[in-house]
Image (spheres, rainbow, N blue to C red):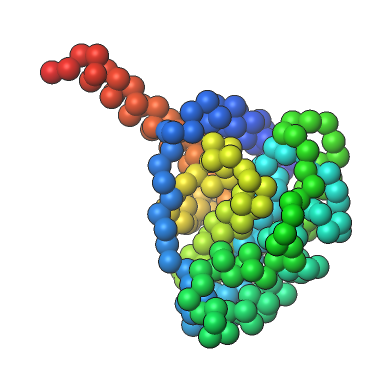
Amino acid sequence: MRKNWLGNFGLLVGFALSILICDSADAGGTANIAGLCRNHIASSGKERAALATGYLEGVQAALNKDRSDILVPPEHPDHPVWWVLPNREITADQLEATLSTFCKSKLNEEKTLLQALLSIAARKEGSPRTGLPLSDGPSEQWRQVLEAGRHTCLDYASASDNERSKLIYGYFLGTKAVGLALNTPRELSLVVWPEADPREVKAKVDLNCRGAGHRNSTVRDVLWLTTVEMGMERWIAGKQERSRELLNLRYPD
């Protein structure tokens, strides 16, 4: 059943991409929520772990949704993941430890978390080895850098509100980091992250995870669905607003 659900969802992603490409100007801007190294260090251990977990999930989602061919396997140093993760560090525990060590330095305490995460990445020079969008290649098998999602909506609901907020913010950071590494066009990034305040996305994920149909779903799947739904909603709202503006120009009062 899960395979069928994800298969149908893949069609939704493709549909979303096809119409979002048409007009990138319809989406609003993302609120800039301050996330500094000093705030990260002041957080609890569980909150820091939640952010690292969310970051990895965001990285995986962005790799899955990006349309470029990935031409090398994850263990290759030119794979895109090494522009957003420390060398050979794919677990949340390892990432959290490296990030916290970096952020504890007095020189880094005012850096944003996105700056910090990119600073500790294995690669900073050059470009990932990718091909043209939609070209043939073995991308699908090389996009997967994480194991299958284990955290369910029940786990998510049992976490504190701060932990859930950190997870969603980490997800946001992961999508942005991959977008920078792959130079993803803005119009294509809308199904990865809907250019919404992370608090808005969290509220929607909270609601979706409480629904009877998602209680046993993984948080990875619910986040994937929620971000695409919100991207579509914002695209539709933008088109409606644009239509109203055109009507007002054509038929002014």
User: Farthest top residue?
Assistant: 251
Q: Is residue 80 left or right of 219 when viewed as pictured?
A: right
Is 199 left or right of 149, judged from the image as shown?
left
Q: Residue furthest front?
A: 125
Drawn side of residue 195 relative to residue 80, left or right: left
Q: Find the residue positioned furthest to the left.
A: 253
Measured as percent of width and height from the top left, residue 4 is found at 72, 36
Using the image, determine if residue 161 lies above or below residue 11.
below
Residue 167, horizontal then vertical, whole percent: 55, 64
At 57% from the left and 54% from the top, the residue drawn is: 176
* Along the line of sight, the residue nearer the viewer: 236 or 150: 236
* Towards the viewer: 62 or 104: 104
Answer above or below: position of 81 versus 50: above
Q: How many marks?
A: 0
- State whether residue 219 is above or below residue 113: above
Residue 114 shows up from this direction: yes
- Residue 114 vertical placement versus 105 (above, below): above
Residue depicted at x 79% and y 53%: 79
Q: Residue at x 20, y 14 (%)?
A: 251
Which residue does the image show at 63% across and 46% down from the upper left? 183
Q: Position of residue 166 (x, y in %)?
A: 52, 67
